[in-house]
Image (cartoon, helix red, strand yellow):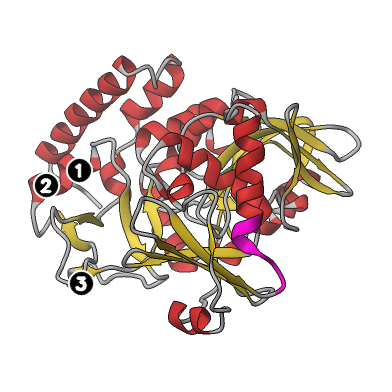
Amino acid sequence: MTLPVDLETDAARLRALMAEDLAVRGVLDDPAWRAAVESVPRHRFVPGFYLPADERNGQGLTVWQPVTAALDHGRWLAAAYSDTTLITQFDGDEPDWEHPAERHGGAPTSSSTLPSLVVRMWADADVREGHTVLEIGTGTGYSTALACERLGSAGVTSIEVDPHRLERAASALHGCGYAPTLAVADGLYGCWPEAPFDRIVAACSFRAVPQTLVAQTRPGGKILLTLSGWLYGYARVLLTVAGDGTAEGRLLGGTVSFMPARTHAAPAFGNPAHWAAELPGKARVARHGPERITAATEEAFRLRFLVQSAVPDAQLTAVGDVVHLVDVVTGSAAMLAPDGDGGWWVREGGQVRLWENVERLIDVYDAAGRPGPETFTLCVHDGGQHLRQPQVPCLPLPAP
C-alpha cells in the first residue's frame, strides 16, 4: 500500500522522537536497537486498535474506544508512536476495522506491546548478530520487524496461535520488506522444523516453562519468558540451557505482565456465590488479609506470583468487599469478608484449605525478609520445575 508522503514524513519524525525518549529513559542503550526503532514503521502494523476511555461505564467496565486513521488520523498516528500497548483483539474475536465498534469490557487476546518493553525483552535475552531466534507470539508483527531489522530476516522465526492475526502480521511484514519464517503454531510446542535456536523469547506468559522450548534451544542458549498463573501473578525469567537438557536462571526484576498463552489461560469457574453457599458456616480470623496480594504495590505484585505455588489452581475474584478464592481442580474454595475493624474473617471448604496455604507462604516470605525476585532461581529438570531461594523452602511450579 502506498501511503501519502506527509504521513511517512510525520511518522518518521514521531519515530525519531519516540526513539529519543526511550534513549533518555535508558531503554535504548544499544545503538543497533535504537536504529531499529527509528527504522520500523509501527503505524503499518497497527491500522486499528483500542484505547481505554477516561471513565468506565455504569457497570464498572472499561470502555474501549476504536482508533483508526479514518476515525481520527491524529490520534491514531500519535498513539502508534507512543510508548503504549495497543489492544488489537478481545476474546479471540477479530474486529472489523472498516466498521469498528466501541467495546465495554472483554479480555484482551492480542496487542502491540509497548515499544520500551519490546526492546527490553530483546535486550534482556542478549540477542546479538548471528543468533537464530524464535519469537512466540507474533501479534501485530511489530516486535518481529524490530528483530528482523536488527538481525536480518533469515535468523528470525515467529509463531502465532491465531491464524487471522498471523495473516495480518505477515502482510505488514512483507509490505515493509521483511521476510522472517512465520507459522501458525501453539507457543507451548515451539517450532521444531526451525530448531534449534540460540534464543527463544515469548511475548505471552506460561504457568511453567514448556519442556519443548528447552529441547529446542542449543546448549548455552537462552530462553526469556514470563511465568504467570491463575491468580495473575507474574515474573520474568531468563534461563540458560545446559547440554543435559536442564535449564536454570534467575527471576528478573520489574512488574511486567503478558497475556497468557491460550492453552494456559484460567478456566471459567461460574458464580462465586454458588461456591460460597457450599462453605461451612464457621469462620476464623485470618492472619493475613487479601490486600497482601491484591494491593496496587510492587511487593503485592511479587508476592502474588509466589503465592501461586501454594495454591496453583486457585483463582481470585472480589464481589463488593468480599473476596473469593476458587479452585476448579480440587473443588476447594475460601471466602474472606472484612470484620469491620480492619481485619478479615475467612471460611474455607474442600480438599485444600486455600487461604491457610496462602497464609503459610506469606509467613515464610515475611520471615525471610520479603526477598525480591532477583534472589530466586528457577531450576528446570526431569523431576519438575522449582523456585529456589536461600531462605525460602523450594517452591514447585505446576506441570507445564
Task: Residue 284: give x, y in percent of width and height.
Answer: 55, 63
Residue at 75 percent of width and 58 percent of height: 399
Magenta run includes residue 27: no
Residue receiving disc 1: 79
At 20% from the left edge and 43% from the top edge, which residue is drawn? 79
Figure disc tally: 3
User: For the residues marked 3 and 2, what is the alpha-carbon distance in whole angstroms?
Assistant: 27 Å
State the image coordinates of residue 294 (x, y, percent, origin top left).
43, 50
Q: Is residue 354 magenta?
A: yes
Q: Which residue carries the number 2 mark?
A: 75
Q: Secondary structure at mark 1?
A: helix
Q: Which residue is mark 3?
A: 59
Residue range corresponding to the magenta coloring: 351-356
Q: Secondary structure at mark 2?
A: helix
> How busy is the neighbourhood of tag 1: few (under 14 within 10 Å), some, or many (20 plus)?
some
Type of amino acid under label 2: Arg
Measure how far apart labels 2 and 1 are at the Cα level.
6 Å
Tags 2 and 1 touching, CB below 8 Å: yes
Q: Amino acid at mark 3?
A: Gln
Q: Residue furthest right?
A: 244
